[in-house]
Every structure is written in structure tokens, then in C-alpha cells.
Image: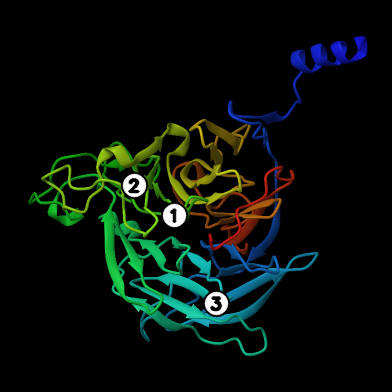
Amino acid sequence: MRYRWLLGLFLAAFPCAGWSSDDDHPRPFPHPATFSTLITTPLQIEGLTADEAGNFHTVGRSPGVGLSCPVWRIGGAPATATVVGHIPAPTTTGQCSPSGLAFDADGDLFVADGDKVYRLTPDAPASPTATVFATGVPGTNGLAFDRDGSLWTGDGTTGQGRVWKIAPGGAVAEAFRVPPMRNSSALGGMLTGEGVGRQVRTFPPGTAANTAGGQDLVANGLAFDPSGDLLVADTARGAIWKVEFDHDGDMKTPTGCDATLTADTLCLEALWVADPRLEGVDGIALDRAGNVWAAANERNAIVVVTRRLQVIEVFRNAPDGATLLRNGGPLETPTSPFLRERTFCTANSDGNRRDNSPNTAGEIGGAGQPRGKISCMDQVLLIRGLPLPVE
């Protein structure tokens, strides 16, 4: 008994180093985490997902005018990339530039690009070209399936905050809007001109003498939680919105609180969390306990938001000792996190913004270097990733 008492005192005084937890149940997250490169890619990448066998999938971006974008399956040890399909170029003079990816329950892969969502069944020998599943979704970015098999996506850099629900047959309907940064007609609001509001500006590429680096993106990565509610990453505000549904799939979250915005715009009560550590948040992923893992890409950081809204920075690139910049890696604009069982990985798009600027430093993006990579956390997740699609 005496030894148990002494052990209790020791643990209270010296908790397990390197882990933090929320105040509900132990929710350990590595702190500080470390990252290693799983694989580099010859083309820039943004989206990342995995199939039921545990193989990652991603798509190369912008290979050239009129050329298709390769869909890669990544597996094995060491990891290798195998072409299992292609996303067609939009025109003979245009370039494909896919972003979000998601598998449905049947094992088909869906890829967002431009104003369309493509579908294909990955196959290494055949390398099929994807066909159009849905159109009329300008700016489509993140993708997430709900438990009924409908696909959801947001409008990305268009900045209007539109979130669409795409039925299994491909029919598109606007479900709601995340409030845009300004209520101007250009961003879907009711006021002509610039409207009223604000715009986030990122340094670099912005400077005090110009207006470059503006950020209006408010509907980025999407993910459903175990309750079937939808979380939407707001890049510009460093926030996550939460939309709740009833058992019939109808929205419970109120809309229409601001007469200067469209009637289907979320009320501010739908704002789930906002925190400076989430600035530049791109993709999000959930574990089985409902914790949200976010890639804060403009900060080269990984952040976790617990169910009790505790915000924990798991990792951020350290500044270089000479330049004081954080662009040397291991993260280089992390975009799409994915939790594969007990492994956390993220795609890196190497954007030339904020902490990753100039993007010629690090492992990708420089002269003669690869253009994209997947980085994985060295520490094992103590809470498994949430199986997708959510059922």
C-alpha cells in the first residue's frame, strides 16, 4: 500500500512527459511531435485520403497544358507511388488542379477540381480516366461523405462560403453558406462595391505597400463527426464552424440572421471554435474520440481541437537559427491531414505564403527538387483515426 501511495505522488508530480490531455477524459497528443517524410512527389499535391487497405491516395497537380493529372496510390515499405488513374484536363488549353479527395463506401475515389467533382475506381493496370460525377460547384475544395452517401463540398477560394450537398446520383443543391469576410456582392452578399467587413492579409506575399496576400477563403476542409454533424474549416478566420442535423438529415443550425447576407448563411451561433493557432486552417480530420486534427497551413503547424474546445498546438516548424524563418520543414504548407488507424500524415503543397515563404527552402519546391510530399508524425496515435466515410 505504501508503494502505491508513493507511486501516486510521483505520477502527480511528474506526469508523462511529452503528452497533453483535455479535462474530460485523457486525450493524449504528442507534444512536441516530430515529423518525417513518407514520400516526395514530382508534382505538387494538396488532397490526401486512404483506402480500406490502408494505402494513401493523392493526385499530382498542374503537369502541363492539356495534360491529365496522375492519381497515385502510395503504399509499401519504403513507400512507393503507383499510378491508379487520371483526372482529365478541363480543356486542351487548360490544366487540371485537383484538391480534395474522398472514398465512398463502395471504394470509388472522388476528386474535386475546378467546378466539378470527378469519380473513378482506382486500378493500377488500367489507370482509368475519371468521369464527371457532379458539376456546378465552382471552387470545390474539401470533400466529405455523410452517413447517407451524399457528398459535401465547399467553394474554396471563391470566398462566398457556399457548401453544397451532392446526392448519390450527382444532383447538386446549396445547403448553406459560411458567412463571407465581407457582405459585398462579389462574395455573395447584398451590398454593391466592396461591402462591409474585413480581409485577412498574409505576409508574405503581402507588404505594407500593396494588397497582395488577401485571404477570403471561408469554406475549406470538411469532415463529419461521429454524431453526423458537419465541421467546416474557415481559413481566413482561423476558425471551424459546426452544422448540426436531426435524425432525418435536416439542418438544425439556424441561418438567416443577417439581412445583408443570403438567407441560407449560418448565424454566428454556428461558430464552433476560433483561435489564432488555427490561422490558415486548411484540411481537418477526426479521431474516434471526436478530436479535430487541423493543418494550419499558413503557419506550418498541426493543431488539435478537443471535444471540449481545448486548442492544442501539436507541432509547428521551428525557426531557422540564422534566418528566423519557418520555411525549412519538415512541414511545407500542410494541407490535408489524414488519420490512418494510429498514423497521422498530411500532404504538403509548398505554397508561397506566410511561414512557408519563400517556398524554395526545405525539401520540396527548390530548383531540381520534388514539388510535393507526404509527411507523417513519428509518434503513434493513442486514439485511432475515425473510419471514413462516417456511418
**Image quadrant in which the N terminus is located:** top right
Q: Which residue is mark 2?
A: 213
Three-letter residue code for mark 1: Gly
For residue 136, the mark is none
Three-letter residue code for mark 2: Gly
Determine whether the residue tagged by mark 1 lies in a helix, strand or loop. Answer: loop
As rendered, which of 55 and 321 lies closer to the eye?
A: 55
Q: CA distance from mark 1 to mark 2?
A: 20 Å
Q: Which residue is mark 1?
A: 221
Three-letter residue code for mark 3: Asp
Which of marks 2 and 1 precedes in the sequence? Answer: 2
Q: Is residue 250 above or below residue 80?
A: above
Q: Are marks 3 and 2 in contact (CB under 8 Å)?
A: no
Which of marks 1 and 3 precedes in the sequence? Answer: 3
Q: Which residue is mark 3?
A: 108
Which is in the foreground here, disc 1 or disc 2? 1
At x 58% / y 75%, what residue is drawn?
107
Asked if residue 323 shows in the view, the reply is: no
Q: Is residue 390 above or below residue 87?
A: above
Image coordinates of residue 293 in percent, x first then y, are 55, 45
Image coordinates of residue 21 in percent, x first then y, are 63, 29
Specify whether 378 is left or right of 374.
Answer: right
Determine whether the residue tagged by mark 2 lies in a helix, strand or loop. Answer: loop
Specify whether 367 is left or right of 91.
Answer: right
Q: Residues within 10 Å of mark 1 (few under 14, many from 20)?
A: many
